[in-house]
Every structure is written in C-alpha cells, then in structure tokens.
Image (cartoon, helix red, strand yellow):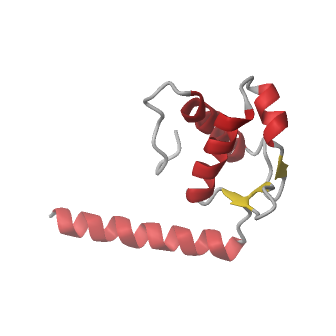
C-alpha cells in the first residue's frame, strides 16, 4: 500500500471501489489527465454508478482526481516541480516529526 493512503476497513461498494480506482490511478492503469467514465468503471467493477461516483468524490478530496462542474472526472496530473515540492515538504515533515519524538 502507498504511504499516506488508508486501507479500506469497511466492505461497502464505494469503499471497495475507492480502493480499486485508487490502485488503477497509482499503478498508471488510469493515466494522468485521462478522462474517467463513471459508467465504464461501474460496468468493469461491476456495480451501479452511485458507489463509483462516491469513490471519485473521495479521490477528488485526496487530490488524485479532478472533478469538473459538468460532472466529468480526470486523473490529476502533477508537474515535476509539484512532485519535487511535495517530496521536499514530506522530508521536512519527517525530519520535524523525528525531532519532536526525541
């Protein structure tokens, strides 16, 4: 599991779908910038569109999916600078956590 992402402990469709879609995003199966079709994912999982929609909303809160007002969803893409900045921030936070723990 990727650090920073909690594992699903419930067994609801939206929770399980969240984990499935998260895995697809993190593995690159759903590429950065790719449009996500709720109906296609629902057919693949197979569930109704409602739990897929709920899972996409949660992934949007996590910053992995961009939702548009017209209800379209795309996998978020990050620049090299974004990734560098995130890495630098994480290192700083880890360093601070170690100092506070001592």
Closer to the camera in the image, 30 or 48:
48
From this view, report whether residue 46 is shown above or below residue 19: above
The residue lying at 57 percent from left, 50 percent from top is: 58
From this view, report whether residue 81 is shown above or below residue 29: below
The mark total stands at 0
Which quadrant: the C terminus?
A: bottom left
Image coordinates of residue 85 in percent, x first then y, are 56, 75
Q: Is residue 51 left or right of residue 11?
A: right
Image coordinates of residue 36 in percent, x first then y, are 81, 47
The residue lying at 81 percent from left, 61 percent from top is: 70
Closer to the camera in the image, 75 or 87:
75
Q: Quadrant of residue 68?
A: bottom right
Image coordinates of residue 3 in percent, x first then y, are 47, 48
The residue lying at 65 percent from left, 33 percent from top is: 20
Closer to the camera in the image, 42 or 64:
42
Q: Is residue 78 left or right of residue 4?
A: right
The residue lying at 84 percent from left, 53 percent from top is: 34
From this view, report whether residue 56 is shown above or below residue 96: above
Image coordinates of residue 94 in percent, x first then y, are 36, 64
From this view, report whether residue 11 is shown above or below residue 53: above
Spot the residue most to the left.
102
Q: Is residue 99 left or right of residue 11?
A: left
Closer to the camera in the image, 39 or 65:
39
């Amino acid at each position: 599991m990727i650090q920073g992402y909690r594992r699903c402990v419930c067994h609801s469709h939206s929770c399980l779908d969240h984990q499935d879609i998260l895995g697809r995003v993190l593995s690159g199966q759903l590429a950065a910038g790719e449009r996500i079709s709720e109906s296609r994912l629902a057919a693949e999982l197979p569930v109704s569109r409602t739990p897929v929609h709920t899972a996409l909303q949660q992934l949007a809160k996590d910053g992995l999916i961009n939702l548009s007002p017209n209800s379209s969803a795309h996998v978020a893409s990050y620049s090299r600078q974004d990734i560098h900045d995130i890495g630098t921030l994480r290192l700083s936070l880890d360093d601070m956590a170690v100092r506070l723990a001592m």
